[in-house]
Image: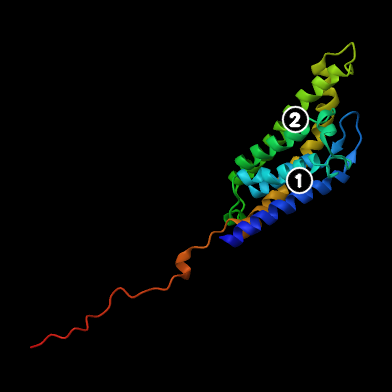
Amino acid sequence: MKNQKLLLSSFIAFFAAVICIGCVMRIPLGPVPIVLQNMLCILTAVLLGGFYGCLPTALFLVAGLIGIPVYSGGTSGIAVWLGPTGGFLPGYLLGAFISGLIAKKPSVEEKKFSWKLFLRLCLAVTAGMFVLYIPGVIHFSRWAVAANRVPADKSAFTYTMLACVIPYIPGDIVKIVIAVAVALKLRPVLAQYLYNDISTDAFTTSTPTDTKNDSSEQA
């Protein structure tokens, strides 16, 4: 049991590092760049499943908050949270939490493909990618109004949707497909090491229950 907890902690730290490394992928597209980290947060959550799924994202967010340059483009600090894309950071955590709960803990039985599992993973990844937009859109809309970035011929909502939602939908669909495919392959492998509880019965020595009565009867 201790080995499984140690492995789980190691995988959480490893996945957090993977999300951090994803900061190098940043394609400018208006005020909100195209990034890889949103998919990595959701993917790692689905791989670990359950509550543990959001812990790599939490570690990643804390690392950036204390000054380690792990946010998109190698940035860090509270200034990123206050900037136009700052709302997406808590969105990553919320999306990862939702994805992990929907996906549930992986099982070694997932080696055998089932449509039920496939649909659950599709729902988990899609829901996570959708949910992470909610804090991001709300924060960006407030930032745009405060910074007077909203054009006179558009509402704050319309500008926000055009700036940080609609252009990214095709790319997000591709990310969802990739994340589901990877999750289907890796979840049973992780389950074999993390959640495959070994019964203690295998390690207990059997004691004979039907012992003979050695007491001899006296005639």
Residue 89, percent from left and from top: 77, 35
Q: Residue at x 87, y 34 (%)?
A: 33
- Describe the element under mark 1 as helix, strand or loop: helix
- Describe the element under mark 2 as helix, strand or loop: helix
Drawn side of residue 179 relative to residue 73, left or right: left
Compared with 18, 158 (above or below) is above
What separation in Å lies between label 1 and label 2 (alpha carbons)? 19 Å
Residue 109, percent from left and from top: 57, 55
Q: Residue at x 73, y 51 (%)?
A: 15
Q: Residues within 10 Å of mark 1 (few under 14, many from 20)?
A: few
The residue that mark 1 highlights is: 178
Q: Residue at x 83, y 41 (%)?
A: 71
Q: What numbered label is drawn on residue 212?
A: none
Residue 186 sits in quarter? bottom right
Residue type for callout 1? Ile
The tag earlier along the polypeptide, 1 or 2, is 2
Drawn side of residue 88 relative to residue 124, left or right: right
The front one of 94 and 124 is 94
Q: Residue at x 83, y 13 (%)?
A: 155
The residue that mark 2 highlights is: 133
